[in-house]
Image (tube, coloured by chain):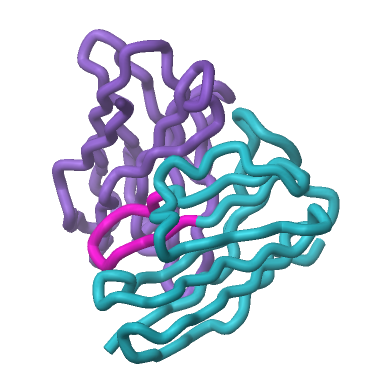
Amino acid sequence: AQRVTQPEKLLSVFKGAPVELKCNYSYSGSPELFWYVQYSRQRLQLLLRHISRESIKGFTADLNKGETSFHLKKPFAQEEDSAMYYCALSGDGGTSYGKLTFGQGTILTVHP
Amino acid sequence: EAGVAQSPRYKIIEKRQSVAFWCNPISGHATLYWYQQILGQGPKLLIQFQNNGVVDDSQLPKDRFSAERLKGVDSTLKIQPAKLEDSAVYLCASSIRTGLQTQYFGPGTRLLVL
């Protein structure tokens, strides 16, 4: 079974401070990890994915297979980063391939 | 490019009533997903279609939930009869094909069962 845990429901930082949203997963194979974001009054959308190795809006995430983590980081938070962030996992084969399992989400608030 | 469309946006019903949700995916997207998002939780996949065939419905409560995508485009999700615990946001998403493709989400339908 695949499971995603986001230990923080709420995270508050001040503008310009570093931010890290934690994500831990449980999966027996080689998963693909994603971060989705939902801004206020907008749809859920993809922020970044591990396989692309991209930095989107200043955010990066590193897959640590030893610690089974995929934490999302940004060195200098901006007010427009305030949103709900979901970590998601897809399995590497069989019926779990392409099937997303989401964490419970973390609400990030960036104060001015 | 038009996004995923869903209707209605809100629905309030009494328990034991039936309800249906509609989804129109992005044009050309072969894969369609229905998720249930209960307050305070992340989305949970209910059913996944590839064209008009079901790929995965392992988490769909089949005694009361049903879904179809007859022509491989639009889809409907039905609940009959509804229970209090079905109160949630129902999200539809689509992707070009199955696999590690970006999923594009609709605005969701917020259901309240009284």
Residue B37 lies in the magenta stretch: yes
- Please indicate whether residue B66 sits to the left or right of residue A68 in the image: right
- Residue farthest front in this picture: B63
Q: Position of residue A45 (x, y in %)?
A: 53, 53
The image position of residue A63, as x and y in percent, is 36, 19
Relative depth, front residue between A26 and B66: B66
How far from the left and from the top, in percent, is residue A60? 42, 32
For residue B4, side relative to residue A29 (left or right): right
Chain A colour is purple
Q: Which residues are magenta?
A: B35-44
Callout count: 0
Residue in the image at 27% along x and 27% along y: A25
Q: Quadrant of residue B16?
A: bottom left
Q: Relative to the observer, which residue lies in front, B15 or A18?
A: B15
**Residue that appears at 48% across and 86% down:** B10
Task: Work out which quarter of the rendered image holds the C terminus of chain A and state it.
Answer: bottom left
- In the rendered image, residue B83, in percent from the top left (x then y), is placed at 30, 75
In the depicted structure, whether residue A45 falls above or below residue B56: below
Q: Does residue B69 belong to the magenta stretch?
A: no
- Picture layout, residue B90 above or below residue B70: below
Residue at image x 21%, y 15%?
A: A67
What colour do you see for chain B? cyan
| Image quarter in which the N terminus of chain A is found | top left
Identify which residue is drawn at 71% across, 43% down: B53
Q: Main secondary structure of the magenta part?
A: loop
Q: Is residue A28 left or right of residue A5?
A: right
